[in-house]
Image (tube, rainbow, N blue to C red):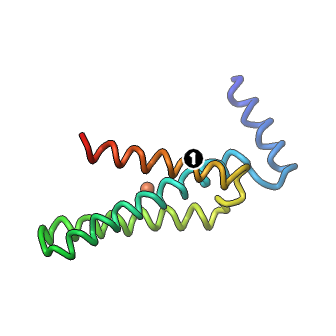
Amino acid sequence: MLGGKLAVLQALMFDCLAFDPFSLFDDGCSSAVETEIDRHYSEQLGQLEASGAAPELAEMIATFRKEEREHRDAAFANGSEQAPAYPLLAGAIRLGCRLAIKLSERI
Ligand SMILES: [Fe+2]
């Protein structure tokens, strides 16, 4: 009940604003995460292709990268860079992603 009223209030507010800051925030997070995932997949794919090892794995990573690039591009197309404090948001998220990737490489 309360959720429905809040949703209506939110819809009215965002109609007045002509944009949905929560949606922009979601897209801002998505574009930042997907940018780092793309970078990581590209590094892995480059290493596999240079070595010629595990061509099936390289093909899988190329497919995953293509999908993640589509997600990234969709987020940018939705206006992710218009999210509040986008440069700070994206920088923090990308740094967190890089740290998580580095940590996962050591475990
Ligand atoms: Fe994704």
The residue lying furthest to the right in this view is 16
Tell me the quadrant of the picture where the C terminus can be found: top left
Question: Image check: 46 left or right of 76?
Answer: left
Q: Compare residues 6 and 103 and report the one nearer the observer.
A: 103
Q: Residues within 10 Å of mark 1 (few under 14, many from 20)?
A: some
Residue 54 pos. (x, y %) = 12, 67
- Amino acid type, mark 1: Ala
- The quarter holding residue 31 reads bottom right
Residue 83 pos. (x, y %) = 70, 53
Question: Which residue appears at 69% of the width and 23% of the height?
Answer: 1
Question: Which residue appears at 45% of the width and 48% of the height?
Answer: 97
The residue lying furthest to the top in this view is 2
In the rendered image, the vertical position of residue 16 relative to residue 37, given as above or below: above
Question: Which residue appears at 57% of the width and 50% of the height?
Answer: 29
Question: Image check: 52 left or right of 64?
Answer: left
Question: Image check: 59 left or right of 52?
Answer: right
For the residue labelled by badge 1, is the local secondary structure a helix, a strand or a loop? helix
Question: Which residue appears at 30% of the width and 44% of the height?
Answer: 104
Residue 70 pos. (x, y %) = 46, 67
Residue of label 1: 92
- The quarter holding residue 56 reads bottom left
- The quarter holding residue 100 reads top left
The residue lying furthest to the left in this view is 53
